Amino acid sequence: MERRGECKLEILSSVIALCLVVLACVELGDAATAVDVYRLIQYDLAGAPFGSRIANLNHHAGSSLTAPNADLSRTVVIIPIADLNVSSVKDYIDRKQPLGGLLFLLPSIFHSENKESKPDADHNSETRDKLVLLERLLVHANIPYPVYFAFEDEHIKAVLADVKRNDVIGQPATATTGGYKLVVSTSEARKVSSPSITNIQGWLPGLKLEGDSNQIPTIAIVASYDTFGAAPALSVGSDSNGSGVVALLEIARLFSSLYSNPKTRGRYNLLFGLTSGGPYNYNGTQKWLRSLDQRMRESIDYAICLNSIGSWDNELWLHVSKPPENAYVKQIFKDFSDVAGELGVKVGLKHKKINISNPRVAWEHEQFSRLRVTAATLSGLSSAPEFLENFGGLSDSRHLVDETAVIRGVKLVAESLAIIISSMVLSLENKPSTYRLLPSPGP
Ligand SMILES: *[C@@H]1O[C@H](CO)[C@@H](O)[C@H](O)[C@H]1NC(C)=O
Ligand SMILES: *[C@@H]1O[C@H](CO)[C@@H](O)[C@H](O)[C@H]1NC(C)=O
Ligand SMILES: *[C@@H]1O[C@H](CO)[C@@H](O)[C@H](O)[C@H]1NC(C)=O
Ligand SMILES: CC(=O)N[C@H]1CO[C@H](CO)[C@@H](O)[C@@H]1O
């Protein structure tokens, strides 16, 4: 584990996002159906391979990893998440037993196009926990056979029921005894030699008064938009990163309309950053900060990074690497706490020092801290995730993100900013010192 944290990510190998698996009923040579499948990621970390390199598949379907004295070297075992025992899969991988392949069936509710909301919460969290464990296992293993994911549907369930029936009889599935064959034929993946990192930046200049020769200060709002997960095509990252990205765009929209009128334009510049490479120690953030004009960077009073603010109940955390006594940290925390109080939610402060000689960067604000820019991360997570974890993997599904949580997060940040920014404008204009910004909770 420690080794992994310190490793350098050299290359992110290319990934076949989506293939088709052909389920062919062996008895009836012509009855074949195509199902969308998503392959397990493959990547290298400091020269060591992870995930699975193998894409091609052409084996009979089986339904169990634990059948006694079965030779599974030519069998693709189909495992619905509901039946999954993660420790038995782990045992199988650890013991390096031969296998033709694995096909995991995800509940259809986890499909990003699924519009259903809020099904059974207990069942949901159990599935979610299993997916988190499975993903952690697969992403950190080096697996010598193909591994695929598909969504459950009536057809594939019927196939699995047939396969199970066959397995119970104990009859090996061969061309003569019937059964199903799973076929994926595709070209093997090629390495991406230099993955590109793209950061996106927005700028709202503050109001500079006549005769004002000094640079006016800047506040940065930042969210990392990249994802990492066992199946790249399924890593939509609804909470990590989606919630932070949505919040950032909404905050940018609100303040750009405020700033379009000189009367409500603050004396702070606002810098917005959507950063890439978040899963890899916020590599894109580092690149972005280094590329900023030095004067612009030095004008940043502080940065607020948004991460996973889409599934919290009553408390958000403000993570900082400067001590709580620091004047900016005190100010940010006070403003956030005041607004949180009015919204009926809580904000807690978590202080974790950074260690410059450790390459591991657990929070986005730590990249700012490394360049001596004050910054904080606002997150529903109370502690830093492990390397490559919590970056929008299989379990980070749309139906587990709560829209009202994102809306409250937006209000919290926008109103806290409005207090700082507008108190200056309004005190200059000699108007009442409270100014309220009420974001419309649109969809
Ligand atoms: C899961 O598998 C492990 C080891 O393979 C076994 O000890 C355990 O009893 C299984 N759990 C369930 C709930 O079947
Ligand atoms: C991030 O970028 C730096 C160079 O800017 C590089 O040295 C480092 O190894 C990269 N990768 C990770 C995972 O931090
Ligand atoms: C900082 O990180 C380096 C490299 O990982 C490590 O050797 C050192 O012990 C760490 N220092 C502290 C105070 O944790
Ligand atoms: C919701 C959201 O913004 N998701 C994006 C996260 O990043 C990946 C790229 O890594 C995009 O494909 C997703 O659309």
Image: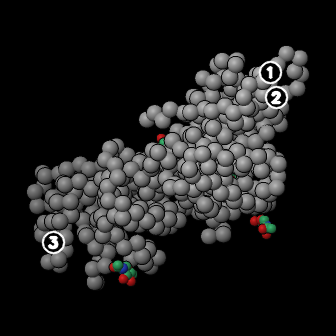
The C terminus is located in which quarter? top left
Tell me what residue is drawn at x 15 percent, y 71 percent. Answer: 165
Q: In the rendered structure, which disc, 2 or 3, sits on the residue that comes first in sequence?
A: 3
Is residue 284 in view from this perspective?
A: no
Instruction: Identify the residue position indicated by label 2 in the image.
Output: 216
Within 10 Å of disc 1 (Cα), the crowding (few <14, some 14-19, many 20+) is some
Percent from the top left, x then y, of residue 328?
79, 46
Separation (CA) of disc 3 from disc 1: 77 Å
Separation (CA) of disc 2 from disc 1: 7 Å
Instruction: Identify the residue position indicated by label 1 in the image.
Output: 208
Secondary structure, mark 3, is helix
Q: In the rendered structure, which disc, 2 or 1, sits on the residue that comes first in sequence?
A: 1
Tell me what residue is drawn at x 83 percent, y 37 percent. Answer: 298
Tell me what residue is drawn at x 73 percent, y 36 percent. Answer: 420
Instruction: Identify the residue position indicated by label 3 in the image.
Output: 166
Q: Nearer the viewer, residue 346 or 146?
A: 346
The N terminus is located in which quarter? bottom right
Secondary structure, mark 1, is loop
Q: Which of 36 and 119 is in front in this view?
A: 119
Verify CB contact (< 8 Å) between mark 2 and mark 3. Answer: no
Verify CB contact (< 8 Å) between mark 2 and mark 1. Answer: yes
Q: In the rendered structure, which disc, 3 or 1, sits on the residue that comes first in sequence?
A: 3
Percent from the top left, x then y, of residue 50?
52, 62
Type of the residue with mark 2:
Ile
Location of residue 358 with respect to 326 vertically, above or below: below
Whether residue 145 sits left or right of residue 277 in the image: it is left
